[in-house]
Every structure is written in structure tokens, then in C-alpha cells.
Amino acid sequence: MRLSQLLIPTLREVPAEAEIPSHTLMLKAAMMRKLASGVYIYLPLGKRVLKKIEEIVREEMDRAGAQEVLMPAIIPAELLKESGRWDVFGPEMFKLKDRNDREFCLGPTHEEVFTDLVRNEVKSYRQLPLTIYQIQTKYRDERRPRFGVMRSREFIMKDAYSFDVDWDGLDASFDKMYDAYCRIFDRCGLKYTVVEADSGAMGGKDSKEFMVTSSVGEAVIAYCDSCGYAANEEKAECTVEHKSDEEIKPLEKIYTPDVRTIDELVSYLDVKSDKFVKTLIYTYKDKVAAVLLRGDREVNTVKLANLLKVNENDIDFADEETVRSVTGANVGFAGPIGLKGDVLLIADAEVPMMKNIIVGANETDYHLKNTNYGRDFKADVVSDIRKVVDGDKCPRCGNPLKLERGIEVGHIFKLGTKYSDALGANYIDENGNEKPMIMGCYGIGLNRIAAAAIEQNHDDKGIIWPMSIAPYHAIVVPVNVSNDAQRNLAEKIYDELSKAGIETLIDDRDLRAGVKFNDADLLGIPIRITVGKKASDNIVELKLRRDENSIELNYDEVVNKVKELIINSI
Amino acid sequence: MRLSQLLIPTLREVPAEAEIPSHTLMLKAAMMRKLASGVYIYLPLGKRVLKKIEEIVREEMDRAGAQEVLMPAIIPAELLKESGRWDVFGPEMFKLKDRNDREFCLGPTHEEVFTDLVRNEVKSYRQLPLTIYQIQTKYRDERRPRFGVMRSREFIMKDAYSFDVDWDGLDASFDKMYDAYCRIFDRCGLKYTVVEADSGAMGGKDSKEFMVTSSVGEAVIAYCDSCGYAANEEKAECTVEHKSDEEIKPLEKIYTPDVRTIDELVSYLDVKSDKFVKTLIYTYKDKVAAVLLRGDREVNTVKLANLLKVNENDIDFADEETVRSVTGANVGFAGPIGLKGDVLLIADAEVPMMKNIIVGANETDYHLKNTNYGRDFKADVVSDIRKVVDGDKCPRCGNPLKLERGIEVGHIFKLGTKYSDALGANYIDENGNEKPMIMGCYGIGLNRIAAAAIEQNHDDKGIIWPMSIAPYHAIVVPVNVSNDAQRNLAEKIYDELSKAGIETLIDDRDLRAGVKFNDADLLGIPIRITVGKKASDNIVELKLRRDENSIELNYDEVVNKVKELIINSI
């Protein structure tokens, strides 16, 4: 393709809307443009990258024995009402009505449609196992679309669903997908970590996320260098220290006028925050829970939701009025002793191990000192509900965990019978008994792979594409197109590379060499062939985008050298 | 792929919902299933066919120099309001709002989005010409979805848009697309006719449709065997007979009590319907028009809309009250003489050529006899506004036209400056002047190609796929899988064909041979290799789906023979 003809409006300036490198570079390198918040147009280069990722995903899905289908994006409300998810998604799901006032949504995911298809078409154990997938456009009306295609409202997903006769079958299907995902991300040139993820309150027994480590990732990963344990922040188990051997002291009530927050207490009492236990009042589905947590810890709302057997978005901080009615005090003085009404008291697993702690007194302007679990109060439930922190002990081997940020590019999940029960997707087994199918689901965000690849492969000049997903393999740059020798040799090389099946660009624009080199670097084409002054001697320069140095080659060596480079790097 | 593992729930019965062969066969052959009215799931075989069509379309677009992009399906309302089409589409367009109450539609087509992109990114004549395309999902909330994927509400379209500096440039871009379309339909194995189509009241100078002739087509084509003229029903020009040489007679008022329709008049007066002129009262945008037309003719509302410079759906029959007020009579007695109020009187071009005609008297229970154009009344406009009929004279050569039904699979259109004017898509020419880009648009329905191919290629046993878009090239059928020799030889052939890159199915199911042959015929796989009793002598049978007879082959000839058959038929 000729750059003079390609729709490639590269930008010199960093676009104001972009906050992270991949977003900036996808705009600057003319891969995409924004049409509306979280809604993007893919220009020719961006579309080529997406298509390459799509082909890798398809090949690996097919190789794993999955069968490709295509579902509609508009889904009748009835199906999501049957599974109970019509209301669960909330404003994140785009809803619409057709001309006959029938309700639809734009599928944020397709569990119901696949389950519906399979319950209609698969009746016997003989037809199982079955894994089907699609590469299709999904819609999520994100509250805060950002980071370009990292979190967009219309995006392309590969979603696969497996149907098995039993849990062992699911394990096998799951493992096949796990392997396929590894091959996909390897082939896309990504460095990734597989982490344990939360499988939700509603069922499912195993859930893993594929995380591309990146400082701009929205997710946090906890991992252990010693034993290899890795989990996302929501899932990461927190270990508990041994019980403090401090001597138990007598309970004291202390006057703490207008001192409400842990920070205020720390400075008012001059005691470290880990000597406090905070009492957080939550509401969930018209009920109230009080959560006890060491002063320097944060609540992991996913763990809390799982414990309460509700969805995360069913949980909210209690309003002032509720706090007053259960504590009998102003906000800021809640504590575990003497809560009024029907309040579920939950203690993080650390709390019973602490001694002589400071808590709110449930009385305005007072706290209690030297409170002790067991002697002064007991919780209804003791459970791990805090967020992991850097240096926490690994739940497997006890060595310190590290935290890192990551971009979630894939998620595989043992659903179990959640949807087959809800929709009645049953099969008849060998003995004529009806049983629910055991399901798994497996998702990959295609656009996000492109962005993640850029996050991991760029420098201050631009993108450095992995060969496998580069929009073109090579770019031929005649330094001066007005020079006949240069132009002719460049055209000849372009022609021969193209004929050899190598995806090649030629920068035939009448621009200064510096501008052309800058564009080539920005676009991130892996191999650059520069045709300059030595063109008259048939000598050209070959440079890899990822390397500093270039080599000189005789013109007739170019095609073989480029072929070799491509084969060695895919 | 093994049929024992493939998700291929073929049906024995004709599904009640299906009215035409392609719809029936796509359901029976397990290519697709309905999720909602006009909304379909593509099963593995259907998806494969779509993908093959997609690849052919992409290759030919790329070969024609078009560049692939990808647009969102959700389009901000502002863009369609800018072009004026937000209200034009009416209920056919799915509309929705996001969580911030911002309006979007699901794109029924993408002129505005492409024009918006190009006005933002292309500034100079140096960047033109440019043709960009996408293969993407479109949404149209059809009033009456039917015929399966022939008229569905979610479908895949290739839409391309060209941008040129002048009309000559547009002609060249248009011709390239014309040629690409011919190659696409040729490669898909379709027999098609290119017809002239209406280009609308709003501009555009040339519009052609690619029609697959088929008795189930929703469109009507008029064509001339002598000179090659072909147009769709809306566009087909009607010629006018010479003026009748009948002697003019004196006007008479006749009593026709309760005789309102042409049929009633014909039988009451015992005169042929072509001696009458009917007067049809229409409303359009708060105005009234009366249309005069020979009694046996029908109004072509597209021609009428173009004449009135409105959209077709702006026109409606006047209600009873309006008819009464403009005619002063009950419905059924309208005529050209003495209409009251501001009524535009339009005569079809035939009317002035007729003599001594019968018309309504604008008086309840009366008609006028021996009315003559010129002597008794004159129209404000005389124009061709009737529908073509079989046997009409060809507007080019005068020989009789024939009518045939067709399925529209492609449409190419010289838009001109309609959208570039509305959205301000201008470029700077060589002299520094700002000019509007000259646009064309080019659409192909991918799903409809699949259905049209089935309409043209099937028999009472099932589909007969053209090789180029068949889901698989060959199917190996061991007659009896319990027989070791048969099963082993079949597996060997399956293996070798697959390794040779031939897309092969093997029917490894333990079913009766008859069932397997029926399924193979239903699926329409072009080449069938039957491994039966002579397996022990390494002899197998090769049969083409489109032929009656089979040939015997030695096992080791199979791969080469199959390869040869494929190469010769793609």
C-alpha cells in the first residue's frame, strides 16, 4: 500500500483526550478516531491490527475444537428476565424498544443467548461436550468510558461457552480454553500473568483472568515471586497474623470531641492507625451490616458481597440517618458494642487477633480504648473481607506478596449450572435421566489486546508492533522521491516484497526524510527498508523498529532477509 | 470436522415460519435459527458461508483499491440531524438513549459517519480520490421482517463510500465498484442482472441495483431482451402510445348511482377499464395532489414522490374528509373538472393521449363521459407516474419489455454532493478554492447473498452450494461405521483431504446410510465421497451434489480428483 493513498492522518500533537500511551498512540498513529464518548472508528491501520488479532483468536479457538457461530447483538428482554439479569446490569446495559414496543438490550455478554440455543438444539449426552464461540460486537454503557479502547462502550469480544455433562468434563473444556488463551496471548506478543479471580456470589467455582502487566492497568494483581500464586485484588486472600501477645488491659471510655476519622484519631491520640478498629455501616437490600476492620485497612467489597450473598452494587454505605439510628450517635463514633436494631456484625479475620484496640463508643464524641474481641464484643461472622496490600503474606507459602497493575485481556470462568438451571438447559444422560449441563464461559477483548500490546511495546517515538499483529510487516522509505535511482529502487523492492506475500507499505510521499522516518517510527512497522544515497549502487538499509542500529544490504538480498525476519518473529 | 461433534441440528420437517426455499433450507440444514422476529443466530455452517462471502467481498474491495475501516453501529443523533435524516427514517430506525440521556441510533446505513470522518481528516485534493468501506452489522426495524435473512432486522452489510474531486472522478470510482461488484457476484456463483434504479428526489445522478433473478424476489425488474435495457419497477420509464385518432365527442354527465370503483364502472357501463381515467387524491406534507391515471394503471409512488420532491413515505391517500372537501362529493366520484381549493393536478403522460374518456364528476353518483384533455380540463403537470407493466414498450428500443422478480443483493449510487453539502465535507483544490467532495455509495448485503445463492441453487433434497461459498468442499460418508474397512478407509481419506487443505466433513455418526445421504444432500456439500462395500478393495464413490451420477475411484486418486474439482469450479 502506498502512503500517498492510504487514509493515514497521523497527528503531531498529543491529543488532549488521551491519558495513557496506547490511547495517545492509537490516535497519533491514525489507528482510530473517537465518534462519541467510548465509541471509536477504526481507520485502515487499526482495522488491520484488529483483523490480525481476530484471526489469531479464531485459529486458536478452532484448534481447541470450539465451533464458531454468530449471535445477534440485539437480545430480547425475555431471555435476560429469565436468567434474572435484566435488572442486575442496571444502567450499564443499553436498552431499546422496537416499533412494536418490544424490549431488547444490546448484549453486554451472551450467556443467555448461547444457553437458549443449546437448550433448544442439544438434548442428549451424545451431543456433548460442546464449545461454541463468536467474535462479535458487545455494548456496555460504562459510567466512565476512558483510556480509549481500554474501556469503551462498543467493543469486539470473542466469547465462548462450553457445555458438559459433568464437572470433570467442564474441567477438561476449561483447560483446553486455558491453553488456547495462553497460545493467543503468546502469539500476540504479550507478557501476561494468569491470576485467580473472583467467581461471584452466584455460583461458579473457578475463575481466572489473563492480565497484561502494565502501569496503566485498571486492575491490581497480587502475586508471589516464590510460589507463583497470583490473584486479582478482589480475589487475593489475606492472611492473618498470630494473635498479639500483649496483655489485656481494662476497657476505658475516652472523650474524643469531634474526632471522627481514623486520621483525626491518630493525630488526636498519637497512636498508630493499626491500633484502631473502624466500624463501617453498610446497607444491602434493606438490611444493615456493620463491618469491623483494622484502622489502616480497606474493605474489599467483592468479598463483602460474596459473604452477604448479594451483588456488589447492592451494597452501599448507610446514610446519616441509618448510622444515627443503629449507633445512637453522630457519624464518626460507630463501634461494635451496643449497636441497636437488626445489624449483622461482621469482623475482618484480623480483628479477633488484635488486643487493646480503640473503637467508636456508639456515643457522640466518645471512643473506647483497650477493647478486646471475646471479652467486650463478638461478631456474627468473622471472615476475610479486606483488601490485600503490598507485603502481605502469600496465602500459599507465606512469603511477601507484591502488588502490580494489570490490564485484563481475558477471563475464563467455570459457570457451573447458574444459567442451565435458570433457563432449563438440560440433557438426557445414558440412563435416561434429565440433568443440567455444566457450563463454562471464556471471554477475550480484541480491541483491548491491541491497546495492551501498545502499552507493552512502545517508546517515545511511537508504537513497536509485535510482528504477528503489526498492520504491515515492512515499510519501504525512499529518502528522496525526486531522485530517480532512489524512487525506482524503492518501487522495485516494494513490488518484490508485495509479490512475495509480505505486507508492505511504501512511503512514496514527497516529504522530508525526517518526517517520513518519524511517521514510520510512529506507526511501528517492524521492518524499515531505507533507500537513500547508495541506491545507485543497489545498497539499501534495513532497520528493525525495535533496534537502534541498521544494516546495509544489497538490493537482491532484501526479500529473503525480510522473509527470514518475519518467520523468526511470528 | 466430524459430524458427530458439529453443532448441526438438521430438521426433517419444513418449519412453519418459512415461506421460501432459502428460508426453509437455511433452517433445515441447520445454518441458522431465529432468535426474534427478523433476528437470527448463525450456526457453524451458516457462519462459515458468511465468512466465505465476506472474504470474497473483502478481496474484491481491496483489489479495487478501497480501504477497510470499521465504524461503530451506534451513531450519535447529532450526525443524522445534521444531514436531516434523523426524522426521515421513521420507525425503521432503532433509536436508543445512553445513561446520560444522549440520543443514538443503531446505524441503518453509514453515509453520515463516513462523511463526518472524511470532512475531519481529508482537507486537500492531494488526499483524493478515496474509497473506504466496512463490513459491519446494520439495523433496520422493518415493518414486516420476512423470508428469513432476506429481510431481517440485523444483518451484515459491506458499505463503501467514495470521495472525489469532481464528477469525472466519481464516474471512475463508480465504475471500479461496478466491476468489483460483478466479480463478487460472479465468484459467489450468482446469476444476476444490473438494473437502473431510482436515485431519489434529493439528488444523485446514477443508481444501479444488482438483482438476482428469482421467483421469490421482492423486487420487480423490467427488462428488454432486444437492447439490454433493464430497470427496477420504480425506475422503469413508461412510454406513451400515440394520440388516439378517435373523433372527439360531446361531454355527457351520466348517472352512476353507488358506482365508485373502476371495476364497478366497468361492469355498470360495460366499457373496458382503459377507457376510464381515475382521479386519486393524495396528501403530502399538508398539501393535496390529484393524480389522473388510466383506469387499468397503477401509480408508481416513487415517481410521484420524485415529482413532488418529497420522500415516498411523506405521501399518503387523502382521508374521506379531505376527498369530500376537494371534490364536493362522496369518495368514488373524484374527477379532474371542478376540484376545489389548492389541489395540484397531475396527469400521467398517457392521459393527454386518450380521447373521450370517462372520469368522476366531482358530484356524488355521477361520472362524466367523453371528457377530453385540453378541451375539458388541463393538468398542472403531465409526467410519467405509472407503474410499468409486462409488454410495455422499451423506452430505448421500443420492443416489448418483460417483467421478472429479483432479489436485490447490491446497490451502487452516485450520491453527488448530498451529504458533503449537508455536512460540509469540502476539500481545497489546486487553486486554493474550497469545494464539496463528490460522493458515491456502494452496498452489498452479505446474508442476502447467501440466501439468494440458495434460491438459485437448490433442489427438493436440499442446497447445492457453489464451491466458492460452500461451508465445506467435501463430505466423506462411510456407509457403515461398524465395518472396520469402511470406517478406516473413510478416516484415512478424511485425514488426507484435510491435510491437503481441503475443507472436509466426515459423517462418522452411527446412523443408517439413507439418513446420512439425506443430510449430505440437505447440507449441499459440493463433493461427496462414499465409502461402502468396495472399501476392502480401496474403491470409493465420488459424487457431485449437482450431478445425478457418481464415479468409482481408487482411494489414492481421491485427493487429486477433489483438488481438481475445486480448482475448476472456483
Image (cartoon, coloured by chain):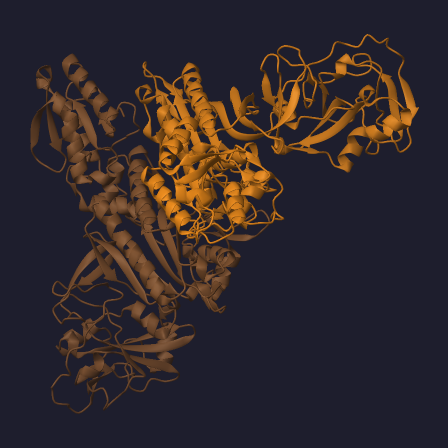
Chain colours: A brown, B orange
In the rendered view, tell whether residue B357 sits above or below residue B514: above
In this rendering, the count of numbered labels is 0
Is A146 on the left or on the right of B539, as rendered?
A: left
On the question of residue A434 being in view, the answer is yes
Q: Nearer the viewer, residue B39 or A268?
A: B39
Question: Depth check: A224 or B570 in front?
Answer: B570
Residue A102, above or below A291: above
Residue at 48% x, 29% y is B189
Residue A445 position in % (x across, y down)? 32, 49
Whether residue B132 appears in this view of the structure is no
Task: Give the residue at the far front of this rendering.
Answer: B537
Position of the C terminus of chain B by quadrant = top left
User: As displayed, is residue A555 above or below residue A57?
Assistant: above
Which sits in the foreground, B360 or B238?
B238
- Horizontal placement of A56 versus A165: left or right? left
Residue B66, picture quadrant? top left
**Based on the displayed image, in which of its 4 quarters is residue A9 positioned?**
top left
x%, y% of residue B471?
44, 40
Q: Position of residue A25 (x, y in %)?
A: 23, 39
Left/right of residue B299 with respect to residue A490 in the rendered view: right
Residue A72 image position (x, y, % from top left): 47, 47
Between B356 and B327, the one nearer to me in the picture: B356
Q: Along the horizontal axis of the image, is A435 left or right of B201?
A: left
